[in-house]
């Protein structure tokens, strides 16, 4: 029997925590192992419980979701994936949460099926960023004066094909879609993605997407 995905829910609203707990525990492959009432509580309980995925509300009193996400993902050896929860999809803090290490975000009014599938996607190491959402984030980021953050120097460590794959990741394409676009096997794309993450010192695909448009590799023109 497959080990269930261990999930922790961090939200200051008890009804949200309990509602998501009921929905997720109804899934045969997902188990809610704990709840947290704010960011500080989330950081402490992640260390105690070791979940695979944390559903993290962005806005909470005290330590908010962005700082908590950064603390969790920056912990040495941490493999915990964080998915931030927001009330509306153009939340001004979503981009900062992704920069802090979140693997994606989900609206709080998502259906039970969407919630469960999002947990599975993030637990599997995929980015929970649809192309439409990615385009909006790029556009939003451009207003902030992109590029910023990391320099382009490390991009030079990538091969031409790896650079091409990185740009496609940033556009929200899955491995299968990238493989179809480049006319190569999906396993080949997976190998490229793994090498990109290692060379750039990134955690996952979401961080790769953020890196791509922070360095200016991907720009909002044409999106």
Image (spheres, helix red, strand yellow):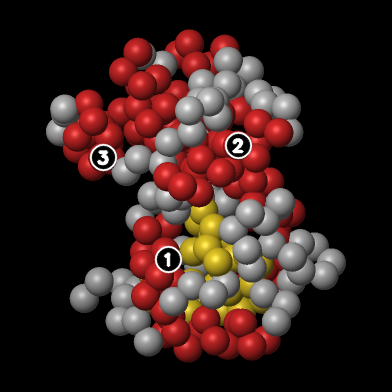
Give the residue drawn at x 53%, y 63%.
106
Tell me the crowding category of disc 1: few under 14, some 14 to 19, or many 20 or more residues within 10 angstroms, Cα based.
Answer: many
- Judge the density around disc 3: few (<14), some (14-19), many (≥20) Cα neighbours within 10 Å: some
Is any atom of residue 70 visible in this view? no
Element at label 3 = helix
- Judging by the rendered image, the residue that carries numbered circle 2 is 139
Residue 66 in view:
yes
Say which residue appears at 57% left-offset and 36% top-offset.
138
Taking 196 as reference, is 6 above or below it? below
Residue 11 place in picture, x, y as percent: 67, 74
Label 1 near label 2: C-beta < 8 Å? no
Residue 135 is situated, as x and y percent measured from the top left of the image, at 51, 40
- Left or right? Give the position of 200 relative to 74: left
Secondary structure category for the residue under label 2: helix
Residue occupying the point 58% across, 15% down? 152
The residue lying toward the viewer, choosing from 78 and 65, is 65
Please state which of residues 2 and 84 is positioned toward the viewer in this rendering. 84
Horizontal side of 157 relative to 153 (left or right) equals left
- Looking at this view, is 150 or 134 the one in front? 134
Residue marked by disc 3: 177
Q: Give the residue at mark 1.
A: 119
């Amino acid at each position: 029997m497959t080990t269930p995905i261990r999930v922790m829910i961090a939200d200051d609203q008890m009804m949200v925590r309990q509602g998501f707990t009921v929905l997720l525990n109804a899934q045969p492959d997902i188990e809610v192992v704990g709840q947290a009432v704010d960011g500080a509580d989330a950081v402490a309980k992640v260390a105690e419980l070791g979940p695979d995925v944390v559903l993290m509300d962005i806005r909470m009193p005290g330590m908010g979701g962005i700082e908590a996400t950064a603390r969790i993902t920056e912990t040495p050896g941490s493999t915990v994936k964080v998915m931030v929860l927001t009330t509306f999809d153009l939340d001004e803090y979503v981009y900062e949460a992704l920069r802090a290490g979140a693997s994606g975000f989900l609206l709080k009014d998502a259906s039970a099926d969407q919630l469960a599938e999002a947990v599975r996607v993030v637990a599997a190491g995929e980015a929970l960023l649809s192309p439409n959402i990615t385009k909006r984030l790029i556009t939003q980021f451009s207003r902030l004066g992109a590029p910023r953050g990391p320099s382009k120097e490390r991009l030079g460590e990538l091969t031409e094909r790896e650079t091409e794959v990185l740009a496609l990741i940033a556009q929200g394409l899955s491995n299968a879609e990238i493989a179809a676009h480049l006319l190569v096997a999906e396993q080949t794309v997976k190998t490229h993605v793994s090498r990109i993450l290692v060379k750039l010192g990134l955690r996952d695909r979401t961080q790769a997407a953020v890196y791509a448009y922070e360095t200016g590799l991907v720009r909002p023109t044409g999106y």
